[in-house]
Image (spheres, helix red, strand yellow):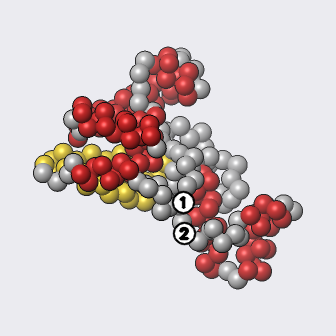
Amino acid sequence: MTPMTTSNNKPASKPDPVKDYLETIGVVCHIQHIGPSCPPFCEDKSKPFMGFPRRNHIHGDEYRLTLTRTQNTSKCESFQYWDSMHNAERNWLISINARMGESNRQDALLAKHGANRTRANSWTMPALKGKATPNVTDISACIERTRPEDYESWCGDFGYEPDSRKAHAIWEACNAQYRQMSHIFTPAELARLDELLREY
């Protein structure tokens, strides 16, 4: 369990420099869409998932990234990742676009957004043609962002109280996740990944 999510809303065709680099060092990447589930930091685990706009479950769908060394398949690690709520809403609306005509689509969006016609109209733009999905660089950036240092500093960075048991459990999960990275990459490779993510 790892507390990863992103607000990256770039097009699905955006560059993926980490994946390109991993291919050069013989690491195969696979991203699997798991579906709606809750990350460790979600406060609404006992509540049902509702439609959009959401007032709870402020996160997107779960994905799983698996990295495997082509020359040593025993070196294989998987990472959980939660995408942004923005992307989840965008993909939901694309599904509506595929099923409805324009007038019915407008009615459905207005029903969700009340009288806010501007908000409803903003989701019927031609830009909503391809679903938003995370790439390897997105997920790697989240792993890098949540890389733990000392516990108190980590709490300050992410807005947790140091005396919270929940915060400590999430911090430990981040530690475990980053240790996974060191299992599959050499120190030099981790340094290069860090450079790529800083440039992204």
Between circles 2 and 1, the one closer to the viewer is 1
Q: Disc 2 vs disc 1: Cβ atoms closer than 8 Å?
A: yes
Residue 185, position in %: x, y? 24, 39
Instruction: Give the camera-side residue of 180 and 10.
Output: 10
Q: Could one spot residue 165 in this view of the protein?
A: no
Residue 130, position in %: x, y? 54, 69
Compared across the picture, whether 135 is left or right of 24 comes to right
Residue 15, position in %: x, y? 44, 56
Where the N terminus falls, by quadrant? top left
Instruction: Give the camera-side residue of 13 and 167.
Output: 13
Q: Relative to residue 13, is residue 27 depicted above or below?
A: above
Compared across the picture, whether 28 is left or right of 115 comes to left
Please tell me how crowded label 1 is: few (under 14), some (14-19), or many (20+) other residues with Cα within 10 Å: some
Which residue corresponds to the image point at 70% horizontal and 49% vertical from the top-left? 55
Judging by the rendered image, the residue that carries numbered circle 2 is: 130
Q: Earlier in the sequence, mark 2 or mark 1?
A: 1
Q: Relative to residue 28, is residue 165 depicted above or below?
A: above
The image quarter containing residue 53 is: bottom right
Which residue corresponds to the image point at 60% horizontal and 39% vertical from the top-left? 43
Q: Secondary structure at mark 1?
A: loop
The image quarter containing residue 117 is: bottom right
Which residue corresponds to the image point at 62% horizontal and 68% vertical from the top-left? 128
Instruction: Give the camera-side residue of 149 and 111.
Output: 149
Residue 115, position in %: x, y? 87, 62
Please state which amino acid type lies under the numbered disc 1.
Pro
Judging by the rendered image, the residue that carries numbered circle 1 is: 11
Tell which residue pokes out farthest to the bottom in this image.
101
How many numbered dots are placed on residues in this image? 2
Please state which amino acid type lies under the numbered disc 2.
Gly
Which residue corresponds to the image point at 32% horizontal and 57% vertical from the top-left? 30
Instruction: Give the camera-side residue of 54 and 117.
Output: 117
Q: Could one spot residue 83 in this view of the protein?
A: yes
